[in-house]
Every structure is written in structure tokens, then in C-alpha cells.
Image (cartoon, rainbow, N blue to C red):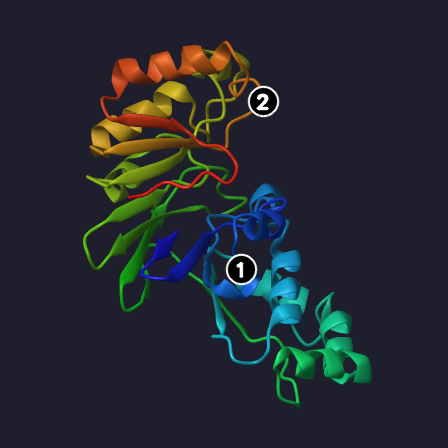
Amino acid sequence: VEVEGEQIMVDCGPATTYNLVKAGLWPTDIDNLFFTHHHFDHDIDYPCFLLTRFDQSIGKENKLQVFGPTLTEMITEGVIGENGIFSHDWKARIYHPLSQKVYVNRGGVLPRKAPQVQATDVGVGTVHTANNWEVTSTNAEHVQPYLDSLAYRIETKSGKSVVFTGDTQPCQSVIDLARNADVMLCMCWDDQEEMDADGEAPGQCGTTGAARMAEEAGVKKLILVHMGAHIASHGPLEKGLGDIREIYNGQVIYAEELMAIDV
């Protein structure tokens, strides 16, 4: 999400760093990252993002702020801390003469500092306030008690609002968070009938679940994300969109990689 030139990233799943660059952004452009939860499909590219951001840095960037539910601090320290599993990488880039030369040629000034990352475990409420935007969160119902999950609302100073449900089943807490939002990005794993028949409905949103949440919350635009292979195929997709439009009266968008949407 871009707000007044600031970039906000939500989750860091497979190929996030690659797609970020394809979209015309560098990891060093990102100063704020919010995790909804710590299933691998939401955080597996986090080490790549952290290391690429550090590799491309010249010491003039803002400290990266990372927020998420329980485990966010532990994972960050485990990846890039003093004794993290990738500490060998950033230490080599700090101390080896070749890496120092590359850093200086890029515009950095020695001595080079260790990666500057501030990770914070957060819960429900106001998570972070910046000059032009604020992020609030609520609990999302996914796979508790094994993992905590959060949904986020980004509210700009100008009054625009975007909600990321993360992975969740339809629940009142997320509906309340999304109340009258301009955009809600909601997981839509599959056709609801398929999910009900397969016993996969608990902990997830399907087509009609996403539609009911969006309609009850009164969101203006529903963007379907985190869609499984079945619902993303021709036939099931058209049926699913039809089922959604029978319940939800706003605009429905099927999200695709690198899609840009104005709010």
C-alpha cells in the first residue's frame, strides 16, 4: 500500500521480494511490514526480503519496522539477529574488503552497521501511527491456538481505508474492523459449497463467506485474494463471482499478480 509516497507491505509470502522488484520497488523502499500470521505462505520470503534490503542499503535508509502477532520478534531475531541463521551473510558483508568496497561505491560510509530492524509482537488495537496513516488490528479466526492471526486496517489522514483480513473464517471482529472501508482484501480459498462439502470451511473464507463479511461491513470494494487453484480456474471462478454478487452489492475484483488498484 502506498500512502503519500510511503510504502507499507502486508505479509511476505513466496516470491514477495521478486514481485516487489517487478512492480518497480526496491526492498529499501519498504519501511513498514505487517504480518497477519506466521504460516509459511505468509512469511517464507521474509529472510530474502531482509537480506536483500540490507544488501542494497547504504546506511541512509530508515530502520525497518516490522509488526505482527506472537513469533514476529523471535523469527526476526532468529533470521537476522547477532546469532541468527543468516548472521554469517551480513557479517561477511560488513567485514570483508570486497563487500566494503561495493558498499562504499554504492554510496555507503564505513564502518557499516548491522541490519537495522525493529520487530514488535502486537495484538488488538492501534498498532502503528505515522504522519499520514495509522494501522489498527483485530483478531482473525484461523488456526488458534496454534498460531495467532490478525486482520489490519490502514486508515489514511485523508480518510481512505484499506482492510487486509489475512486468513480467517467469517467473524464479527473482522467485520467490525472493516466497517465502511473503501477496500477489503479478503481471502477466498474456494467455492463455499466445495469447502462445506470437504469440511474445509472452518478457519477460512470461501466465496459466500467473503461476500457476507463485505456486505455486512459495508465495504465499497471487495478484492479476492489467497484463492486456491480450483476457484481460480475457469468455470468455478465465474460461478464463484456470481455467487458473491448475489450477496454483495459493491465492486468485486479478482486479484492478480502485480495488479495496481487506486483507492
Which residue lies under the disc numbered 2?
Answer: 229
Residue 63 in percent (x, y) is at: 49, 74
Q: Is 243 rendered above or below residue 260?
A: above
The Cα atoms of the two marked residues, 1 and 2, are separated by: 29 Å
Residue type, label 1: Thr
Q: Nearer the viewer, residue 237 or 135?
A: 237
Q: Residues within 10 Å of mark 2 (few under 14, many from 20)?
A: few
Q: Is 95 rendered above or below residue 68?
A: below
Q: Quadrant of residue 100?
A: bottom right
Residue that appears at 78% across and 72% down: 88
Residue that appears at 61% across and 56% down: 46
Residue 168 in percent (x, y) is at: 42, 35
Counting the numbered discs, the total is: 2
Residue type, label 2: Ala
Q: Nearer the viewer, residue 84 or 221?
A: 221
Q: Residues within 10 Å of mark 1 (few under 14, many from 20)?
A: many
Residue 120 in percent (x, y) is at: 47, 66
Residue that appears at 55% across and 25% down: 228
Classify mark 1: helix, strand or loop.
Answer: helix
Q: Say which of marks 1 and 2 sits in front.
A: 2
What numbered label is drawn on residue 72?
1
Q: Residue furthest front?
A: 105
Residue 73 in percent (x, y) is at: 54, 65
Image quadrant in which the C terminus is located: top left
